[in-house]
Amino acid sequence: MADRTLVLCKPDAVERGLVGEIVGRFERKGLRLVAIKMLTIDADLAARHYAEHTSKGFYPELAAFISRSPSIALVIEGTEAFKVVRTLMGATNPREAAPGTVRGDLAIEVTENLVHGSDSPESAEREIAIFFPELISS
């Protein structure tokens, strides 16, 4: 089985109508969409997803942003999927992201940078279990 990773098209991507563009970039690269769902991330889900950030000063703003409107959660599959996704997303700060990347082409603010992608196979496994528990074999 190919590697899997989690991608979130955050509220700003949904609000701006960019989900199709973002997913299309992953598909054109040769990655395969395995699962997709639209959801509004509540406080509990935000805390589980961003567990490493809950004690940081910026967390309240982050939690408010991620829960303000629906997001699209995706599981994407392919060889070294998390690396490919992270490359296609571009740098976290869109002003530093290379042209041709999702953030470099479509985002401006670091606080609203359109997408989240797992940063390692371990993070991908943890995040897929949070958003798609039905995909985890027991």
Image (spheres, rainbow, N blue to C red):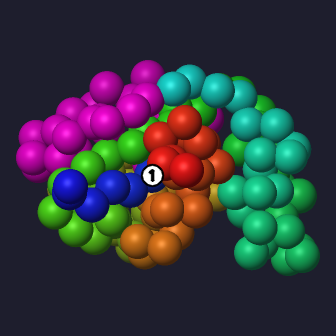
Q: Position of residue 120 (x, y in %)?
A: 43, 74
Q: Is residue 61 magenta?
A: no
Q: Which of the two residues, 68 or 43, is positioned nearer the viewer here?
A: 43
The residue that disc 1 covers is: 6
Q: Disc count in the image?
A: 1
Q: Horizontally, is 86 left or right of 55 in the view?
A: left
| Element marked by disc 1 | strand
Q: For this view, does 1 lie left or right of residue 76?
A: left
* Image quadrant containing the N terminus: bottom left
Q: Is residue 50 above or below residue 107?
A: below
Which residue type does callout 1 highlight?
Leu
Q: Is residue 109 visible?
A: no
- Identify the residue at image location x=21%, y=34%: 24
Q: Is-magenta flag for residue 30?
A: yes
- Name the quadrant containing residue 56: bottom right
Residue furthest to the front in view is 138
* Residue 8 % position (x, y): 51, 45
Seen at 71% across and 29% down, the residue is 40
Q: With respect to residue 4, does 86 lie above or below?
A: below
For the record, the magenta segment spans: 7-36
Residue 45 appearing in the image? yes
- Residue at image position (49%, 48%) is 137
Percent across and percent down for residue 111 are 64, 57
Q: Quadrant of residue 20?
A: top left
Q: Which of the pair 32/65 is nearer the observer?
A: 32
